[in-house]
Amino acid sequence: MRDTRRARLMLGLLLAVALILITVDHRAGNNHVLGPVRDFAGAVFGKVERVGAAVTRPITGFVGMLRDAPSAQRAIADLRKENARLRDEVSAQRLDKGRAEKLDRMLGLAGLGRYRIVPAQVVARRTVAGFEDTVEIDAGTGDGIRPDMTVLSDAGLVGRVVQTGPAGSTVALLTDPALSAGARLEGGNELGVVSGLGEAGGGGNLIRFRLLDSTVPIGVGRRIVSFGSQQSKPYVPGVPIGVVERVDNTPGEVTRTAYARPFTDFSALDVVGVVVAAPKRDPRDAVLPPKPPPPKPPREDQRRGDDGRGQGHASLEAEWGLGDRGRGAGDESRATTERQAREGRPEAARERRGRHGTQAVDGEQYAQEQHAQEQHAQEQHAQEQHAQEQHAEEPPTAHERPAAGEPRNAPRQHDGAAADDGRGGRN
């Protein structure tokens, strides 16, 4: 009882002292009587509070982590699912965009050839008796597909339909060795035959082209189009096939053989079109893609290799006189180049322009430009001489003062005769 009574007494005393201090501090206003005591207590207890927080913060954090672990795991799992779903959507959108672009190009190709097509998608690769390289498409007799119809892609010929079903069809690819199609070279009428090489032929994606007339030359880079079948079955005319990459020149053969790279990428077939109605007229070469521009010739510094930059810079200094030799060597080299171009040697002019990194031009054109510039310079020089002659022929004005030592009333003589002599000499 004594301890309890003493504790109550101490608690009451502390409360009374606290109330007194609060009242005094409040009535003091801006003149804080207990300001130093408060500052000292704040500094001491502030340090104690920071130390205590540093000690207890890891413990409270660990306890909170254990408390929130289940909900955090659920949030992480939800985020992973959302991320996977978004990735699938992006992949699907990218795939749909690629298919839409291929379909657009294929419709453009069909429009150029006046082909009426039914779009389809390759769904699987399968093997059919008698053929080695075939694919399955998702269009069949319900879509108007019949056997022996031409199949094309956004780039060129794919093959022909060999089997049909209500909702699907089988297409034999042009790379199949059992498949052959009539073909011709671009811009000609010489008949040939293209056929696949297959896996056993070791041709990869190449196809064989046999030209029936062995006297007709075949060059690398020539393009091949379909010749067309009777009643356009199984092949319609004018479909691009490929580009010649290699020619076999075997003497004594009745036919000429070449190997071409197909326009169609058979390793990535996706969207195809089945020609259900052939054009009324042969489109000839109208469906072929435009030829790529010829490659630009390499610059002089690129042909020199890794050290071409330094050597090219030294050659420029030597040619144009930018080094220690002054500008005389450069002027002499430039004059020599222009003289060679005018004398029918355009190679030097073309070589000099190539070393400066500009676009290479024909030497004859360069010589004509230089000749036109010289004529323009000569005309300007003649006009300046004519103006000087007219100025020399003008009589002296009345207020022109006589020369020193000459009588004031002596007749003045001008150099008209000398000017006439000068004109006569020039004429």
Image (tube, helix red, strand yellow):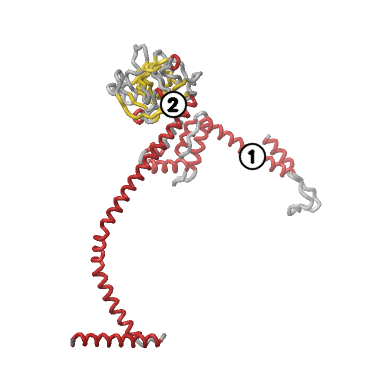
Q: What element carries label 1?
A: helix
Q: Where is residue 148 in the image (x, y as percent from the top left)?
A: 39, 18
Tell me the distance, in whole angstroms, between the alpha carbons under discs 1 and 2: 70 Å
**In the rendered view, does 332 fall on the left or right side of 153?**
right
Q: Where is residue 63 in the image (x, y as percent from the top left)?
A: 24, 63
Residue, far right: 409
Can residue 301 be seen in the rendering of this structure? Answer: yes
**In the rendered view, does 239 fall on the left or right side of 58?**
right
Q: Where is residue 237 in the image (x, y as percent from the top left)?
A: 45, 19
Q: Is mark 2 on a helix, strand or loop?
A: strand
Crowd tier of the residue under label 2, counting other residues whose Cα lies within 10 Å: few below 14, some 14–19, many 20 or above: some
**Mark 1 or mark 2: which comes first in sequence?**
2
The amino acid at mark 1 is: Gln
Quadrant for residue 273, please give it.
Answer: top left
Are dots 1 and 2 in contact, CB under 8 Å?
no
Q: Position of residue 418 (x, y in %)?
A: 71, 41
Image quarter hosting the N terminus: bottom left
Quadrant for residue 99, please give it.
Answer: top left
The amino acid at mark 2 is: Val
As drawn, 383 above or below 77:
above
Q: Residue at x 43, y 21 (%)?
A: 225
As drawn, 336 above or below 117:
below
Q: Would you name the residue on which mark 1 appears? A: 380
Who is closer to the viewer here, 359 or 277? 277
Q: Would you name the residue on which mark 2 appears? A: 118
Who is closer to the viewer here, 79 or 38? 79
